[in-house]
Amino acid sequence: MNSYHLAIKDMPENMRPRERLIAAGEHSLNDTELLAIIIGNGTANLSALDLARHILAQHGSLRFLKEASLEELMEHQGIGPAKAANIKAAIEIGRRISLDVREKMTIKSPEDVKNMVMEDMRYLDREYFRVMYLDRKGGLLSMENVSVGGLHSALVHPREVFKPAIKKSAASVILIHNHPSGDPSPSKEDLELTTNLIAAGKQLGIEVLDHIVIGESTYCSMRSQQLIQF
């Protein structure tokens, strides 16, 4: 029996990786969707998303995919020399960016956080929960989407917040999320979540410096407003 196959072009536009990237930005896509965009086209039996899913399943993650050779990538059905070269080139670009520490930004205040994320996050129609991972001098190691929720909430687990921190040897984190309503006032749930993440961070020796809530044209720093004991 033939397995059911849905090509990307047959999907609703809001589910297609390229269209989602254009509409909501690259941060809204997961690893499979990003890899599917790099692959471009699938085969008669597999969509680009299917190919990306199979490749990541075999290699574990984008991190380990970096170690795959062109020949190993081409062992996957539907991946020829051109697509394998695209994947290796994209990974190499990421590697070189990660090595370029000359422009590493130092986060010194809630205003620095606001300046980095306000224009991106103020217009999002879902709650995005992001985390800044910092070194011991406050240098920004990376900023990652941890969770994307509905209109009013983003579910977050401490494991999802601190696993990247451990991998990156981050000394501290800054929590960030947006309120699609435009009002940056923290909810009761926001305060409870922050308290739980602060406690989890203390267990791991990773300090939660602040939780910034982004609204329409303003923001709230929980530390500055002394809403929680950090």
Image (cartoon, grey):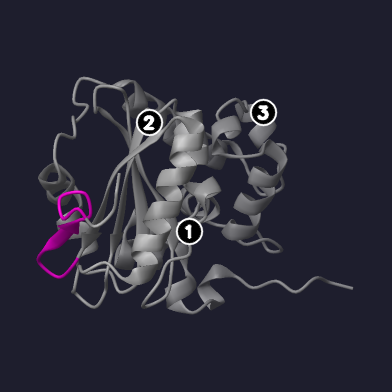
Of badges 2 and 3, nearer the viewer stands: 2
- Where does the N terminus fall, quadrant-wise? bottom right
The amino acid marked with disc number 3 is Glu
> In terms of sequence position, does the residue under pointer 2 or pointer 3 come before the other?
3
Q: Neighbour class for label 3 at 10 Å: few (<14), some, many (≥20)?
A: few
- Real-space CA distance between mark 2 and mark 3, rounded to the nearest whole angstrom: 20 Å
- Real-space CA distance between mark 2 and mark 1, rounded to the nearest whole angstrom: 30 Å
Contact, CB < 8 Å: mark 3 with mark 1? no
* Residue wearing tag 1: 156
Q: Residue furthest right?
A: 1
Residue 93 tag number:
2
Q: Is residue 55 above or below residue 72?
A: below
* Residue wearing tag 3: 71
Of badges 3 and 1, nearer the viewer stands: 1
Location of residue 207 by image quarter: top left
Nearest the eye: 203 or 68: 203
| Magenta part of the chain | 215-226
Q: Position of residue 214 (x, y in %)?
A: 21, 62
Q: Is residue 98 above or below residue 193?
A: above
Of badges 2 and 1, nearer the viewer stands: 1
Secondary structure mostly taken by the magenta-highlighted segment of the chain: loop
Q: Image point 37% across, 31% down: which residue?
A: 93
Left or right: 23 in relation to 220: right
Say if residue 221 shows up in the picture: yes
Q: Is residue 92 above or below residue 213?
A: above
Badge 2 marks a residue whose secondary structure is helix
Q: Image point 15% across, 50% down: which residue?
A: 224
Left or right: 76 in relation to 120: right
**Residue 153 is covered by the magenta coloring:** no
